[in-house]
């Protein structure tokens, strides 16, 4: 059995090799938006350079930024329930390190963001994958896990849980004395307005741990700013662990984001949401033209497709080597028959030719989307 991401590392080598040889490349691997961040955010960064302080930040993050986030994101929690970290991924690591003992049972909704599988293996958890199309509440009841984890909207398939579904899982995990992690990395990219409004009303309780990031929302994956909302006690422990293992997030980015959030570009999110939705629609209609039915996801910026293969890892390597189209095999998301197309860097003008090349390759190799 291959280790998580083994094939992705090979794909990244193929990318570098093709770049060196100046060969064609359609890198649809990662979810790093290719749009510019808001101009006023960049201006705020420029203006923050000469402001102090430049020493270490408080372990939980700059209190001014915490206040700004609470008001900008309308978080129904107080500052003691929020920590800022070097991206939400680092905060997931810290939370899992504090919550899990070896062999603890964890229910992870599948398909999942690969980091969860990697981290849970790292902490020797006993993982059960849940399927949102099945009776997952009953399964959670039977398993009585220490922790339930889901991402909504989901990476890789865009599945978006409603407030009622989240509330049901929250109530059940509370009753079982379990924790409930909700990863909302794509909360700004829910394409159904009703669902989107619904979620912002969700009330965070002591057993709920909510992870958010500015990586996708403001197109600043490289700035590394995420935050976590949880009970005061856990946040305090997370701050201590952050201090002891990593040190907190850099000061300048925190200052710049604080300035920006106090006076944000209100139209930015709807503009970027429109760009990604339009790319997703175009990919789907381009498949439809070729009589392949692909439904547009409810959220995030990925299309997750099932192929008539038991495992798509070799297929992805061959596809990359022969065509320069780089896709992420479903194995890393817990669904080996699938492939993930990221539209985060896919220019609209290139979609038609990309789908043409991809479908031609599938046909030549007798592989079908099912
Ligand atoms: C579901 C999910 N959570 C978290 C992250 C990581 O976010 P960050 O850049 O804040 O570490 C990603 C990145 O792709 C993601 O897809």
Image (spheres, rainbow, N blue to C red):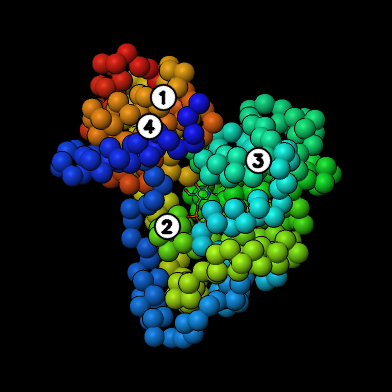
Nearest the camera: 15 or 279? 15
Whole-angstrom CA distance, mark 2 to mark 4, is 26 Å
Q: CA distance from mark 3 to mark 4?
A: 39 Å
Distance from disc 4 to disc 1, alpha carbons, whole Å, reads 21 Å
The residue identified by callout 3 is 124
Q: Residue at x 62, y 60 (%)?
A: 228
Give residue 51's quadrant in the image: bottom left
Would you say the beta carbon of the disc 4 residue lies within 8 angstroms of ligand 1?
no
Label 2 vs 4, first from the N-terminus: 2
User: Residue 362, relative to residue 143: is it above or below?
Assistant: above
Q: Secondary structure at mark 2?
A: helix
> At x 44% / y 76%, what residue is drawn?
252
The quadrant of the rendering that contains the C terminus is top left
Q: Is residue 206 visible?
A: yes
Q: Position of residue 346 (x, y in %)?
A: 31, 43
The mark found on residue 312 in the picture is 1
Q: Secondary structure at mark 4?
A: helix
The nearer-to-camera label among 3 and 1 is 3
Q: Residue at x 33, y 37 (%)?
A: 11
Q: In this image, 346 relative to 252: left or right? A: left
Compute the Cα span from label 3 to label 1.
27 Å
Location of residue 210 (image quadrant): bottom right
Crowd band around label 3 with a 10 angstrom C-alpha radius: few (<14), some (14–19), many (20+): some
Q: Mark 2 sits on what residue?
A: 221
CA gap between label 2 and label 3 equals 29 Å
Name which quarter of the figure residue 307 lies in: top left
């Amino acid at each position: 059995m291959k280790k998580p991401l083994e094939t992705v590392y090979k794909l990244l080598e193929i990318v570098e090799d093709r770049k060196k040889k100046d060969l064609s490349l359609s890198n649809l691997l990662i979810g790093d938006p290719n749009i510019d961040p808001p101009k006023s955010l960049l201006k705020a960064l420029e203006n923050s350079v000469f402001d102090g302080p430049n020493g270490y930040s408080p372990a939980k993050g700059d209190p001014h930024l915490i206040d700004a986030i609470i008001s900008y994101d309308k978080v129904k929690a107080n500052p003691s329930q929020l920590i800022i970290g070097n991206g939400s991924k680092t905060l997931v690591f810290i939370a899992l390190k504090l919550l899990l003992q070896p062999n603890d049972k964890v229910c992870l909704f599948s398909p999942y963001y690969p980091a969860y599988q990697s981290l849970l293996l790292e902490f020797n958890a006993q993982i059960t994958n849940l399927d949102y199309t099945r009776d997952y509440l009953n399964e959670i009841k039977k398993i009585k896990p220490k922790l339930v984890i889901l991402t909504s909207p989901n990476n890789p398939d865009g599945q978006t849980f409603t407030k009622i579904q989240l509330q049901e899982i929250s109530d059940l995990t509370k009753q079982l004395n379990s924790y409930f992690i909700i990863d909302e990395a794509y909360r700004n990219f829910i394409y159904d307005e009703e669902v989107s409004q619904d979620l912002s009303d969700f009330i965070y309780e002591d057993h709920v741990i909510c992870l958010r990031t500015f990586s996708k929302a403001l197109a600043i994956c490289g700035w590394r700013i995420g935050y976590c909302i949880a009970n005061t006690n856990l946040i305090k422990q997370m701050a201590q662990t952050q201090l002891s293992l990593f040190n907190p997030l850099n000061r300048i980015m925190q200052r710049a984001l604080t300035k920006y959030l106090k006076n944000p570009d209100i139209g930015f999110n709807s503009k970027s949401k429109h760009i990604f939705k339009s790319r997703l629609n175009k990919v789907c209609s381009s498949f439809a033209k070729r009589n392949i039915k692909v439904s547009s996801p409810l959220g995030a910026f990925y299309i997750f497709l099932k192929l008539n293969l038991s495992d798509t890892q070799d297929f992805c390597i061959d596809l990359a080597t022969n065509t320069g189209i780089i896709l992420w095999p479903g194995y890393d998301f817990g669904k080996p028959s699938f492939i993930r197309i990221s539209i985060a860097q896919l220019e609209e003008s290139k979609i038609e030719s990309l789908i043409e090349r991809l479908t031609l390759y599938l046909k030549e190799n007798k592989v079908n989307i099912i």
